[in-house]
Amino acid sequence: MTIKRRFAAIDLGQVHYYTAGEARADNGKRPVVLMHASPFAARTLNPLTAALGETRWALAPDNLGQGDSCAPDVDEPDIGYFGDAMVRFLDALGVERADLYGTHTGAHTAMNVAIRHPDRVGKLILDGIGLPPRSLKDDYIVHLREKPPYDYAGSQYLWAFHVIKDMFIWFPYYRHEAANRRDRDVPEANDLHDRTLDLLKNLFSYHKAYIAAFDNNDGGKRFPDIKVPTLLTAAEGDVSGAAMDDVAKMIPDCARRAYPAGVQPGDVGPAAATFVEWLDAPSPI
Amino acid sequence: MAGRAITDLTHGFIDIEEGQVHYRTAGQGGTPLVMFHGSPGSSKMLNRLIAALGETRQVIALDTMGQGDSSSPARDDVDMAYFADAARRALDSLGRFDRVDLFGTHTGARIATEFAIHNAARTRKVILDGMSAAVTGQSREYAATLDKRHLVDQVGSQFFNAWTSLRDAYLFYPATARDAAHRRPTGLPPLDRLNDHVVEILKGFRTSHHAYIAAVTYPSPERLPLLTAPTLAVCAPNDVPYPHLEGVLDLLPNGKRIDYPHDNPETLATDSENRALAKMLAEWLDREDQ
């Protein structure tokens, strides 16, 4: 399925998005909107967007201040700010009701939209959302508030490249000790390049959605407010996977699936098939 | 540098056969002005000139295939006629553009020339900034170095490469001759502009050499005599092709020049210099007596 890049105009500026599949196809399937993780961009979801676009209209917008979307117009937006932007994005495209898929930061944004606008959301897929302790969240937030280096020596380039690479090597990515090692492959050179570039485009705004996600949902307190059918999922090896049992108990209408691999080219098949099967299953009334 | 700045102009994508063409646009009315940027870079480098010219007319600034946010060229062995043809197909897909003015700088000047030659009936006036009147041995040598500069790796060497190469392009000509004799008389632009430019270069890092090589080997002595539309040749005095300006005029059947005391609009010119240049260009475009 061919992916196209587009812009949608909202009051703040332009939202950049990837799209696949037929717009408003009369096949009884709602559009699906995919919301990406920080500090990345919707580009990282292209394989999944293309796979879901085989059966429905798939839209993957860049969060405000990430990828190629305009930046937030406030210093410390909360997750509701990003949820509102997504609703205005849906308005701009004339989408009244959609299924939502969100991963990490995107899961927080998608959950926010589902809780505050249940009439706009059919089903919700939350990928990689856990129950991190407040101490860890605060640690992340302190770190994310630090300004990146930015100078004529080009320090920002070395910084951005290693932030991205470290995401795959450490957890948290800024703690470089053996105890913080993660068992994940570093992306191949082209993917690493594109992810670094997306961070470089947004040196002074990438952290806003990231912080908003960490500042959201302490102790899972928002989970009971989700009133739409929800699929809780995580890739094998995802750091949030350990909390899935506890999270599932807190979401009223919750199904669970794990998928064996990531959502990168080559291994997106099982994840896409899992999501499509659940999205297409009739909902209990 | 802030995200807000990139949305001051409206962005869009146009679908063509081999992918998508990204463009920046401003303004309405008048004869549409189509703008082509230099290499390596994108239409972002022209954003201040786009905004200033957009005050008096519709401006559409295309990212060249393989650069900025436009897709890769359809194939590897492309020439300037290909880039002009991709631009023509993009405009045809965007709407009715029966009559356009063209502005091109450096690589963009070659694209504008080819566009005008192949689409003479729809080209009203042409502005060429930083055009060259010859293909030198140095150009061919430079093209050979460009052909090796498009690989990315897992140690991220391309980031250091792009940053250092652009800095050196301000300091030396050719950028690879790093001695006092080859020092250019310029400083570096403000950090935000330098940084934004490098980010745009990195977007096209793997593919921008196609247009760049086609530009530095472009046979302007053979092609410029075929450009019949009224053409304005301009160049900033401290820009590398400035010594070519008279030679370019000799080759143009219908050429004029104006001198502007400012730096290159994509790189060192200040905001007010860009506005002043836009005013001069707009006056020439709107003049009846050509």
Image (cartoon, rainbow, N blue to C red):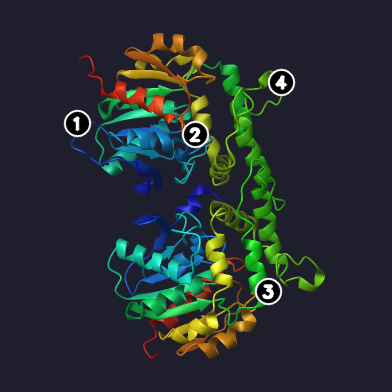
- The CA distance from mark 3 to mark 4 is 52 Å
Question: Which quarter of the figure is the C terminus of chain B placed in?
Answer: bottom left
Task: Give percent across and percent down for residue A283.
Answer: 23, 18
For disc 2, the marked residue is A209
Identified at 49% across, 13% down, the residue is A243
- Near mark 1 (Cα within 10 A), the count class, few <14, some 14-19 or many ≥20, is few
Tell me the amino acid under the disc marked 4. Ala
* Residue depth check, mark 2 versus mark 4: number of the one nearer the observer: 4
Q: Which mark is residue B138?
A: 3
Task: Identify the image quadrant of residue A64.
Answer: top left
Q: Which residue is mark 4?
A: A178
For the residues tagged 3 and 2, is the chain the same?
no
Q: Residues within 10 Å of mark 2 (few under 14, many from 20)?
A: many
Instruction: Determine the chain carrying the residue at label 3.
Output: B
Subunit bearing disc 1: A
Image height of A222 relative to B96, above or below: above
Mark 1 vs mark 3, CA separation in Å: 62 Å
Q: Earlier in the sequence, mark 1 or mark 2?
A: 1
Q: Mark 1 or mark 3, which is nearer to you?
A: 3
> Residue B200 appears at what percent x and percent y?
55, 55
Q: Amino acid at mark 2?
A: Ala
Q: Chain of mark 2?
A: A
- For the question of whether residue A84 can be seen, the reply is no
Viewer-nearest of discs 1 and 2: 1
- Which residue is more in the foreground, A82 or A274? A274
